[in-house]
Amino acid sequence: MKKFKSIVVLAMSVASQILMGCGEKMPDGDLDDVKMYCDFPKVMSLAEKDGERVDIDALGIMDFKLVDSLLIVSTQDKNGLWKLYRLPTFDSVGSILKLGNGPLELAYPLPINQTSLESDLTDGKNILEIPQFDKKQLVSIDLTASLDSSQLIGETKEIPNVPVFPVFYYSLPECYGYMISVDPEKLKIKRELFKDDKSKESRVLSLLNNRNVDSMEDIGVLSSFPVFQPGGSRVAEFQATRGIINVFDYLSDEGFSLVRCGVETDIASSFERRDNSVTIYGGINAYKDFFVAIENEYENEQLSGQSLLFFNWDGEPIMKINLPMKNVTCFDIDLYSSTLYILNIEEDCILRYNFEF
């Protein structure tokens, strides 16, 4: 036993010396297991001249998503919030969702990245579920049936246990649901996992919910946005200002915090970045075998560039793509055609690039 303890102590000492020798210390993490990334085995850069502007008639683009052979673009057009286009020709196949108080109408425009998508491989259906917190409801749209019949097909469902300040709700397979809200009493971000409309205990979520601030005006420092592994049970949730990506499995209840080398993740450093309008990450997307985050790069506290960081679900760096612009807020990847789509928010347009993954 003494020999075993000596080996453990020696191993910890060696690991500590390695980190110190690299000039890095282990940063703060929300979860017990903290992984750092510094370099990527593959780095490539896109040139702006190689991008092709997608020819669509959507204005006031909020974000977009690729769903099978469709490009869905969410806008602020109250008579057709989401525009649908057929890939790869971008022929319009109409629009869905309107503002109003009628059946299957929305109270406010909503980005599609706040909508859950469930694909039923058995019957080929794509179901979109859109939270409407004012009514404590989900607007559930059968996208496949709607396109086949040229009319909106769907229903409304109740959202269970809606808190006072809900922020995000996502429907997951096997009757699971994921809720994020603001707890104004404890001054924290609260995450909840539901199974069959009942709250389910989670060790990982309890750890993530531990952080709090001193006032409501500071709560934004803790704000986070999750994405979910298609066909799997993993979640990648990034905190833009703190510079942490928490990755966990909601079924196994295991996870880790992913942090870039050189980034201080303590609250004081996060406040300083907030005060200087600095965010480490600008967006995230999830795929079956990996997830991708937009990384913001700064010089003298001025945004100087952006890149896409690819990680597998174990947190290992795969690839980095340097983007030719610094105003990208949304992206998606067509894995079948190796095409990257990015939203240039300043020019209100979507660009596409061919790249080898």
Image: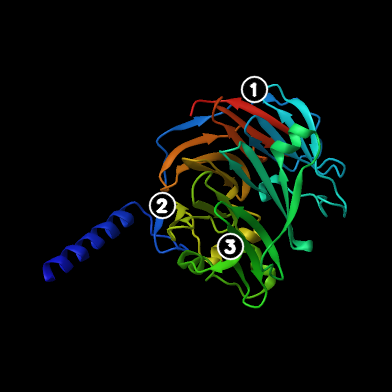
Q: Is there a contact, CB below 8 Å, between mark 3 and mark 2?
A: no
Task: Give the percent coordinates (x, y) of residue 8.
Answer: 21, 64
Alpha carbon distance from label 3 to label 2 = 36 Å
Query: Position of 341 compared to 250: left or right?
Result: right
Q: Secondary structure at mark 2?
A: strand
The crowding category of the residue bearing disc 3, from other C-alpha atoms within 10 Å (few below 14, some 14 to 19, many at least 20), is few
Three-letter amino acid code of the residue under disc 3: Asp
Q: Secondary structure at mark 1?
A: helix
Identity of the amino acid at label 1? Lys
Q: Nearer the viewer, mark 1 or mark 3?
A: 3
Q: Residues within 10 Å of mark 2 (few under 14, many from 20)?
A: some
User: Which numbered tag is attached to residue 36?
Assistant: 2
Mark 3, secondary structure of its residue: loop
Q: State the residue lying farthest toward the bottom.
A: 185
Q: Is residue 332 left or right of residue 92?
A: left
Residue pictured at 80% horizontal, 33% vertical:
150
Residue indicated by mark 3: 196
Q: Would residue 148 be found to the left or right of residue 102 on screen?
A: left
* Residue at x 45% of width, y 53% of height: 258
- Residue 1 % position (x, y): 13, 70
Q: Which residue is mark 1?
A: 49
Q: Quadrant of residue 153?
A: top right
Front in this rendered view, residue 85 or 175: 175
- Identify whether 306 is placed above or below 162: above
